[in-house]
Amino acid sequence: MSPEQSRARSSAGCSTRERIRARLYFKYEWWKAVDYANRWVGDLNDVMSPSGYNPAYYHFNKLVNGHWEGNDCQNFLSQALRVGGWTKDYGIFTSDAAWWYRGGGRFDHTRTWSAVENFRRYSCRATARTSSTKVETR
């Protein structure tokens, strides 16, 4: 990578070119994402609690020695973004250019939905979604 290319990278690892290519596909309502997060955040070890986990989504945590160990952060973030208005980007589930969840099973989602590093690469192309003036205020 040339020095010019290095300087073009943002702190999130997105190049200027990637940010320019990004498009706004919808109206984002951030307060819906916040309300969703407040509704479903809960004690990791109390996933059966109504406030602990949304049963409509696959549970990526793992039960170890009677306690849940977290591997679900990106899934939770994706759920909130979806409720806020992020639209699906269809494509093969292993692609960093796709973001969707069909529900039901472990393989009914993209890697960008559930894995932080994959989502970081995806979001570099989608940053206009939340940086546009079309983001609604409450």
Image: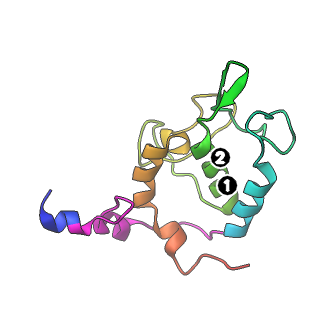
Q: Is residue 138 left or right of residue 2?
A: right
Question: In which quadrant is the C terminus drawn?
Answer: bottom right
Residue nearer the viewer, 40 or 86: 40
Q: Which residue is mark 2?
A: 76
Q: Compared with residue 104, is residue 83 higher up or lower down, i.e. above or below? A: below
User: In this orientation, does residue 51 appear?
Assistant: yes
Q: Label 2 crowding class (10 Å Cα cut-off): few <14, some 14-19, many 20+?
A: many
Q: Magenta segment: does it hold 83?
A: no
Tell me which corner region of the image, top left, top right, bottom left or bottom right, holds residue 18: bottom left
> Secondary structure of the magenta portion, mostly?
loop
Q: What kind of residue is marked 2?
A: Phe
Q: Secondary structure at mark 2?
A: helix
Give the magenta range. Answer: 7-28
Q: Compared with residue 123, is residue 50 higher up or lower down, i.e. above or below? A: above
Q: Which residue is mark 1?
A: 80
- Residue at 67% x, 62% y is 84
Q: What kind of residue is marked 1?
A: Ala
Q: Secondary structure at mark 1?
A: helix
- Residue at 39% x, 60% y is 12
The Cα–Cα distance between marks 1 and 2, rounded to whole angstroms, is: 6 Å
Residue nearer the viewer, 32 or 74: 74
Question: In which quadrant is the N terminus drawn?
Answer: bottom left
Q: Is residue 81 left or right of residue 42?
A: left
Q: Is residue 49 left or right of residue 4?
A: right
Instruction: Give how far across and how far down residue 68 sits, in percent.
Output: 69, 29
Q: Residue furthest top?
A: 65
Tell me which corner region of the image, top left, top right, bottom left or bottom right, holds residue 107: top right
- Cβ atoms under marks 1 and 2 closer than 8 Å: yes
Instruction: Give how far across and how far down residue 95 sits, in percent.
Output: 41, 41
